Amino acid sequence: MAQASGQPVTVLVTATASDPEMAARIAHHQQQRPAHWQTVEACAHLADAIGQYCVAGQTVVVDCLTLWLSQTLFTADAQWAEAVTPVLPAAWQSARRHLLDTVAQVSGTLLLISNEVGLGVVPLGAGTRVFVDEAGRLHQALAGVCDNVVWVAAGLPLAMKGQIPAR
């Protein structure tokens, strides 16, 4: 979809190479992208980067929201996740609101990539369950402000809202 837009493409990446396996994943993704696409590491300030790069005549790909969510929720001081009754950190709530507000206002073409993590077994651990719940809530909220929502399974796109953009 990004290539089909015919516009300059910027990829906002949210992964960090925290171990050799993730470093290999990142390298694989880098090799798959066209060399002329601009890549920007944007995990810490994703909404700001979307606002900066997703302007008229530009296509921005965010890869990916679930990694951003994980890194935003589970910071170094993520002791909330082990509490008997977890309370989401205020920083997450603020980052989520900022993202939703920014996505609703962009003038360029924005393609958000995320993973559906709520279709499987309910995970052990309160923090992990909160992550799954928050991913679902984030997807629902973003679907509310986006024109098109496309779910891709087995490489096949299914329009959940709107239509499948030209590929």
Image (tube, grey):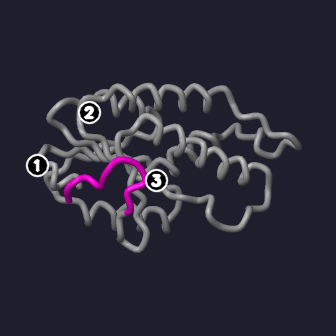
**Outermost left residue:** 6
Q: Measuring 32% from the left and 47% from the top, which residue is drawn there?
A: 111
Please give left or right for residue 79 compared with residue 103 in the image. Answer: right
Residue that numbered label 3 is attached to: 114
**Secondary structure of the residue carrying numbered label 3:** loop
Q: Write down the region rendered in magenta.
A: 158-167
**Secondary structure of the residue carrying numbered label 1:** loop
Which mark sits nearer the N-terminus, 2 or 3? 2
Tell me if residue 3 comes above or below residue 59 in the rendering.
below
Q: Are marks 3 and 1 in contact (CB under 8 Å)?
A: no
What type is the residue that disc 3 sits on?
Ser
Residue 60 location, quadrant: top left
Residue that numbered label 2 is attached to: 53
Residue 118 location, quadrant: bottom right
What type is the residue that disc 1 sits on?
Gly
Q: Measuring 43% from the left and 69% from the top, which residue is drawn there?
A: 153
Q: Quadrant of the N terminus?
A: bottom left
Task: Identify the disc placed on residue 6.
Answer: 1
Magenta stretch: residue 160 in it?
yes
Q: Residues within 10 Å of mark 3 (few under 14, many from 20)?
A: some
* Magenta part, dominant SS: loop
| Mark pair 3, 1: CA separation | 23 Å
